[in-house]
Each structure stands twice: as C-alpha cells, then as structure tokens.
Image (cartoon, rainbow, N blue to C red):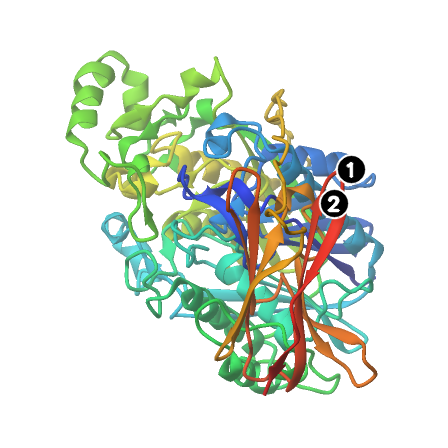
Amino acid sequence: MGFRAGRGIADITGETAECGLLGYGKADQQSAGLHTRQRARAFAFEEGGARLLLVVCELPLMSDAVVREVLRRLPEGYGAANVMLTATHTHCGPGGYFHHRLYNSNTGGFRAATFGAITDGITEAALAAIADLEPARLRLAQGELKNASVNRSRRAFDRNPAADRAHFPDAVDPATTLLTVERGGRLHAAVNWFATHNTSMTNRNRLVSADNKGYAALHWERTVAGVDHLAATAPELVAAFAQTNAGDMSPNLGLAPGLGPTGDQFENTRVIGLRQYEAAAALIGAGQPAVGERASEGEQASEGEQGSKGDRAPGGSPDPGDEWASGAREISGGLDFRATHLHLSAVEVRPEFTGDQRPHRTSPPVGGAAAFAGARVDGPGFKGFRPGANPLWDAVSRRLVYPFAPALRDAQYPKALALPAGPVNRVVPVIPESAPVQLLRIGPLFLIGIPAEVTIVAGLRLRRTVAAIVGAALSDVLVAGYSNGYLHYVTTPEEYDAQEYEGGSTLFGRWELPALCQTVAGLATAMRDGTPVDPGSPEPAVPVRARRPRAAADAPHPGRRFGDVLDFSLIGRRATVAFVAAHPSNDLRRGGSYLFVERLCGDGSWARTADDGDWSTVFRWARSGGATSVATVTWNIPEGAEPGTYRISYHGDSPPKGPFTGVSEPFEVR
C-alpha cells in the first residue's frame, strides 16, 4: 500500500524572564531573555492501517505530565503505544512543567504558563502532522560524525568489557542516522539521530536557547531551505535533530564547560550544530548544493548570524532527478509498535540478563552523592560532592545502611546513598518510578523509547537485544533516549560501579539496565511474533498546585511610555536598541516574536527580515527598578544582509493597557 507521511511544527517556548532554566539545576540560572525559540517538530506516518506519531521537542526533559496532557488531546487511534514524545535535552529551556517536585526545584514550583506553552505547541504540531498525511517515499541513510562529541566519563567507559569498548574505538558513538520524507520529488521532512549532549550553552547562560541541536534544525530550515517560521502557511521543510544514547557524550570537546571547538559558548553551539547538519545533509547526496558551506561562511561567531534572507544558501531539497547518497535506501516494510510501563522500583531480573547468571532485583530510586557533583565536563553541580569517592557519604552508606539492608545493598552498592527518593515519594512526589518503555518500527528502522539518559555502551546492549530478536541490522536499531518521560540515567553495571556522575544518577541501581534489556526483549519478541503486550500501569497522575503567577509590577520609566527607545547604537555589524519594557510573561508571544528586524522597501513599506527565533537576534530583559524594566534587542548583522535602510521594533504587553510597540530610528546597512 505504501507509506503516507505528514509533518508539523510549532513554537513551545515558555517563560523567557524570571523562570528557572531546567537542565543544570542551578537556582541562579533564571531566564533573562531569548536567543533561539524552542519548537516541536512532529512526524506522522501511516501504512496498512497502522499509525505512528513522532514528536521531537526542543525541551530539557520530557515530563510525564506533558505526555499525559498531549495524549489526552490527540485524535482517536493515537495513544501511549504509538506516540513517541522525545526531548532534545537543551539545558537552557524554561522549567516548571513537571508534576514531580525535583524538576521544579529552581522554578518556584509548577509554572502553568510554561506548561501551557509546551502542551499547546506539541499538540498543535502533532495535529498539523496528522492533517498533513499524504503519500510519501521514506528513505533511510547512515553515516558517521566524529568531531561533535567526546566521552565525558571515560573512567566509567573503560570498565566495560573489551568487546563492548571495541565497538566504540574512540569512546564515542559516531553514528548519524537520517530518515527523510519525500513527496512529489521534493524533500519535505527529515529526522536525524546523533548522540551528543545539548550542553554547548553553559550554566552561566540565562537566555532561552535550543542549543546545538536547535541550531542544526534552525540552520537547515531557515538558512538553507528559507523557511519562515512565522508564516501562516505550512513550511517547505521540517527538519528535526533528535537524541539517541547521549548519556556520556558531550559536545565540549575540550572536556570543560564552554570549551568546545572554540572558547565561546555561542560559537560552540553554532559549530557543533552545523556539524550535525552537514553530516545529515551529506547523507542526502549530490542534490544538496554546497551542504552548508556557503551559509557557514557568512555566519558570525558570538551570538550568531541567522535571519537575513540575503545570506541563505540555495536549495534545501534535492531535485527529483538527483542521486541520493551511497547507502541511502528507500524503505518499506510497514509500521509496528509495542509499549509497556515498567515499575522500575521492583523488577525481578532473570539470570540471562544480569551478566552474572543469577537473578537480581531493582530497588526504589536513590540518588548517589556523585549525582550531586554534576557532570564536570558540561557543568559542575553542588559543592561538597564529587564524582567517584565521597568519603563521608560512602562511610555512612557502607557502615550504617548497607549492613542492615541486604536487598538494597544488592541493588545499589557501591553507590554512596544521598537522596532516598523512593521513601520520600511516599510523602511527596519527587520523581516518577514507572518507566514507559516503547519499541517503534518504521520499515527497517527500530526505535527503542527509553525515558532516560542512556550511555553509549548501555545503548549498545539495548540495541543488540532488539536486533538479535527481530533480525535487524544493528545500525537500524536506535535508542531514542529522553522519550515519554524522565528517570535520569541508565549505565551498564560495570559503569555503575565507577560511580561517576552517570552511575550516581542511575537511580534504580546496577540492575536497571538489565531490567530494561529484559523489558525490550519482551517488546521485540511480541513485535516479531505479532502478539500483544501487557501495557502495564502508567505513573499515577500527581495532583499539582500551580504556582500562583505573580502580577508583574509593570510601570514605564518616569516621563516615558512603554516602547520608548532608551538607547541606540550601531557599532560595526551590531545594532543594539534598549526599550522601555513590560514583563515578557504578560504575553509569551508563542508563534510570534518579541522583536522584528525590518528593511525599507522601494514602495515605502517595511519587510521583516529577522525575528526573535533567528540566530542573528538576541532579546534580553532586565528589571531596572521595582516596577520598571528594559528590553534590549541586539541584531548581529549577517555578512550577507542586503544593503539598505533597516529598523528594529520591540513588541510587548502590559495589562490592562494592552499591547504596545516600540520602534528604533532607521539605520543604514552597507
């Protein structure tokens, strides 16, 4: 019968001011503006009566509360088994959208506005993709990318058996996989999977950012394909850059925060994102002109470039007659799916999965001391903790806890126990304990949905488990980490014993990976045999008291009006305007923009050339007094910007007075 496919995209940006950014967990990392918007990119598939929906969300983590709300809004026929909501894991997105306390710890609690922006946007993208379903050709290609990741936990990786280490001779997973949707001889959608943390932006950054994977998607859509994300019509191309087993993969190639290909976090974000784009686009083949080279010449380093139509590379879709890359193949074979909910606190793991040929049992979740140390390569955690040995916590655990709790010792040793989340959950919901585990098939491609951060060797064992049962090539089986929820890390038992950050964050103990391998083996067997599976029990809905939004104490500066220009400068190729502002959370402008860069046309009208979703623009907000504030808009003028007269406008809202606009004086770009 052939595939039908559709795509959709929507804005999911939450509160860009005075909201804790999720990812690093720092109390002082509160949003203070916007660099790039966060988007959800949805891909719907149908074949032979079967349906699948994949939504790649530029979020720090995927929340079970978000999943529950989105599934509630989807049409009949779409549910927990055949819908995958996956996060790219940016560490600079507004938080507060969980119903579990731990993830709202730096946001002052649940943030209804951010939760609403996320769930509304994901639903909007999903419904657009479903409505867009049309006959399509799907192609799958694989390649390698070796200069966009480094192993940040080498001491733990090196504890794995030689056969596993040999699969990753450079201690990284270089695989880059591209699934494309072609309709009418044109490229309409692309999904890329590659393992690297979305942590090019550091924990000192306070601008909302989709980070390196967001840049890769923005570059392909906006710079290369010329997509206008604010247009009312469907985009020509939707391109998503999703995660796989990135648990121990960092983009900070210099093994320190902010030390990637360069020493600048904005430039690191751009370069690592560009490398992911180039590796993906190269898999399309000769039809892609100059694969990012022309565009990259005009892109600027710090705080970016994108937005001017004048510097866009030509094309964006292969011509109908072009050859595709070697190894890219049109796929068939239909769609299938299986899913279950696994109560990870009490899994009996059979001997064939444990590695020591003895049965074992997982335990309720416990955070280790090493977990609070943070991943030093991407951003240090809390003082008083470190990866590996933590003498005080080790002594307490080994002398006072483990001797009196043999079952806990079997599951958690040698972890230095620091946060007994399981017992705390009985009093107040801190973290989920039920793991949604999913297996999707799109032709020969198998996606293992895991609600956690999976290291590359842990991912290899999950992939080998599925590949052996369904008879697939190992390269056609991927771990889709950060999917359908979040339960921290998954390491191998050998890595767990090192108690680096990742092992300390493997909450359910050293048998957590074997338990997941056992579960995906059951899903793969059922898929192979065409039998159903027990869906299990999802995480119970957690009642939540929404943080009462604080009324923004907005007032213009004395003698000024909202939107008045306070300062303007044009230095080199950077234009900066400061405006009398109102609080950005008065209107999140989802699907819109806080700013426009406009060029004067010959007929006297003004044409938009950039907005707040572009790489070349930066929107900052700061209080200047008890009730007054300033919005500062920066435009880093791209080298390819068309000469002419420009202006910058700022758009805000201050109830009850309503929306307002401020406009800079015109200035010349030569």
* Front position in the image: 602 or 298: 602
Quarter of the image where one finds residue 338: top right
Q: Which mark is residue 346?
A: none
Q: Amino acid at mark 2?
A: Thr
Contact, mark 1 vs mark 2 (Cβ under 8 Å)? yes
Instruction: From the viewer's perspective, tell me whether residue 645 is left or right of residue 158.
Output: right
Q: Position of residue 485 (x, y in %)?
A: 56, 37
Q: Position of residue 532 (x, y in %)?
A: 68, 35
Determine the secondary structure under disc 2. Answer: helix
- Reply above or below: 413 against 517: above
Q: Position of residue 400 (x, y in %)?
A: 20, 14
Q: Position of residue 650 (x, y in %)?
A: 66, 59
**Residue located 22% across and 21% down the image:** 397
Q: Who comes first in sequence, dot 1 or dot 2? A: 1
Determine the secondary structure under disc 1. Answer: helix
Tag 1 residue: 73
**Residue located 48% across and 14% down the image:** 426
Q: Which mark is residue 123?
A: 2
- Reply above or below: 544 against 514: above
Decide: few, some or many residues near mark 2? Use Cα within 10 Å; few <14, some 14-19, many ≥20: many
